[in-house]
Amino acid sequence: GAVVSQHPSRVICKSGTSVKIECRSLDFQATTMFWYRQFPKKSLMLMATSNEGSKATYEQGVEKDKFLINHASLTLSTLTVTSAHPEDSSFYICSARDLKAGLSDRGLSGIYNEQFFGPGTRLTVL
Amino acid sequence: AQSVAQPEDQVNVAEGNPLTVKCTYSVSGNPYLFWYVQYPNRGLQFLLKYITGDNLVKGSYGFEAEFNKSQTSFHLKKPSALVSDSALYFCAVRDGSWGKLQFGAGTQVVVTP
């Protein structure tokens, strides 16, 4: 299956600093990547959808100036948490969409997609 | 609009007993349904999906799920649970091929020896 990596896996930073998290699709090209945030023992909350070469689309309530997303290539998207504060401490998970031409899951020819998840990044802001 | 409900915060089961994790969904179009498992401080691992075809879907690690359109359910099952199955399980739904994944709240499974 397709592999998505994240770096770093764990980061601790001081309040007020900025932190960059990388998400890479290792063996496929991803025109679309997704960034999620997860609180302890809670569900994943979609933060934004990142499309290669264009601006990210943020979900309601997510500050785009706080969480900067760049999708500069078909295999790399970055999430930068600017001026991090303790309340930004969380588990951040990225996901990459793999497009395949051929038969879709419903047996229809065309383009269909699968979404693969990275291992997550634990951010702790002191 | 789409939504997913996992009514149980936690499921406790003894090793060797059957395991069921419940999920119900609501979508306006064609449901694409998924189950993922998450171990502590790890990302999501894909277990199985339903797109079309047989209502009973078999997935990884001996898990299976049954799609029930009339009850809008997609319960995850395993005939004989292992201690190593203890983890957080997420049901997710997508409205059609291009919709956003909507996750349920998650169900913590605890399998005791």
Image (cartoon, coloured by chain):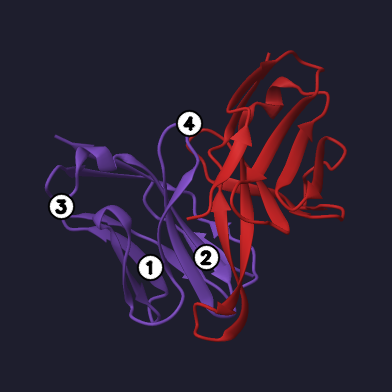
Chain colours: A red, B purple
- What is the chain identity of the residue bearing mark 1? B
| Chain under callout 2 | B
Name the mark nearer the viewer: 3 or 1: 3
Q: Which quadrant is the C terminus of chain A positioned in? A: top right
What is the x, y in percent for residue A38? 58, 39
The residue tagged 2 is B93
Provide the secondary structure element on which disc 2 rests: strand
Q: Do labels 1 and 4 share a chain?
A: yes
The earlier-in-sequence mark between 2 and 4 is: 4
Q: Nearer the viewer, mark 1 or mark 4?
A: 4
Q: What element carries label 3?
A: loop
Mark 3 highlights which residue? Answer: B80
Q: Which amino acid type is marked by label 4?
A: Asn
For disc 4, the chain is B
Compared across the picture, whether A85 is left or right of A53 comes to: left
Secondary structure at numbered mark 1: strand
Label 1 to label 2, Cα distance in Å? 10 Å
Query: Contact, CB < 8 Å: mark 3 with mark 1?
Result: no
Marks 3/2 in contact by CB < 8 Å: the verdict is no
Residue B74 got which mark? 1
Residue at the spot of label 4: B41
